[in-house]
Amino acid sequence: MTKPVILIIDDEESIRFILERALKNESYEIYSAKNGRDGLELFNKHRPKVVILDLFMPIMDGFEFLWEVQPQPDDEFEIIAVTVHANDEEIIRCYDMGVSRLLRKPLLLPEIRRIVKQSLDNKAREIEHRELEIKIEKNESLFRKIIESQTELVCRFQTDGILTFVNRAYSIFKNKTKDELIGKAFLSGLPDNERTRLLDSLISLAQSGSDAVHEHQLKLPDGSSVTLQWTVSADPENSQEIQAVGRIIRR
């Protein structure tokens, strides 16, 4: 397993020594620089997970370093700023430039160890969460492509009967666009009393905890009738939404 890289940038040799000493037994790979210019070179070379950055240094100070690095919320590293003196305006400025937290000197070794570990853990969780979101989006996109290719009538509707999703087959069957259907009533072709009774029946079956099948007749605009068979189930991630797959079994 690769050791997390920690980069220390401070013009005071004693501070660099204290920080290295605080972190040397924590299974980190540690690099240090005495100014922002040297620190930037090490940053680009080793891609640290945590940067401990002094704000006020010769040659290139912490603010110039931040301007060069341009930290963003989705970066895989965090920057911890350290300083002896910084006024309110400078503190706000460093947070605006992407610093995760600011510590004041003198630094306490237990605090440094705790904060560095916390920063690593926070960033690891953020990355894991972001990767999971990407995976879910890809799976959802694939799921929708599969649903769109099906000949069955696939839809989702809320417990009040309002459609939230329809596939292409459903849209063709109703002879309407998706935009015309979503936000409107499921089974809108039925008389109100029959639609309400059927909707209550489907929702009750779906919320019973297992897939359920229900059949009913639907009169088409041309006067003919079809028998529709619906397989319904409650959305496991949203108890207020029902998933339904319909098939025409008799004309």
Image: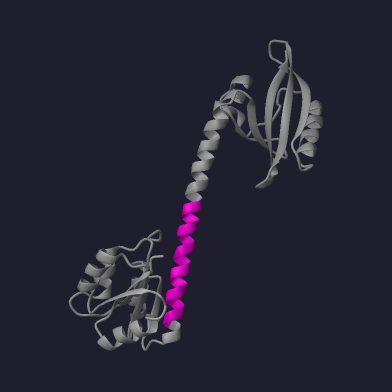
Task: Please determine whether, in this image, residue 42 is positioned above or below residue 18.
Answer: above
Image coords of residue 180 (percent x, y): 58, 28
Q: Is 230 on the left or on the right of 85, as rendered?
A: right
**Magenta segment main secondary structure:** helix
Residue depicted at x 28% and y 64%: 69
Is 31 placed left or right of 101 in the picture?
A: left
User: Observer-nearest residue: 65 or 114?
Assistant: 114
**Residue 83 sits in quarter:** bottom left
Residue 195 lies in the magenta stretch: no
Q: Quadrant of residue 7?
A: bottom left
Q: Position of residue 104 (x, y in %)?
A: 38, 84
Give the residues in magenta. Answer: 112-132
- Does the magenta segment cover residue 115? yes
* Rendered residue at 47%/67% (across/down): 122
Q: Quadrant of the N terminus?
A: bottom left
Residue 176 spot, x, y in % from top left = 59, 22
Residue at 68% over, 32% down: 244
Q: Is residue 179 visible?
A: no
The colour scheme applied to this rendered structure is one colour
Pick the residue in front: 234 or 66.
Answer: 234
Identify the residue at horizontal 69%, vertical 10% (top origin): 222
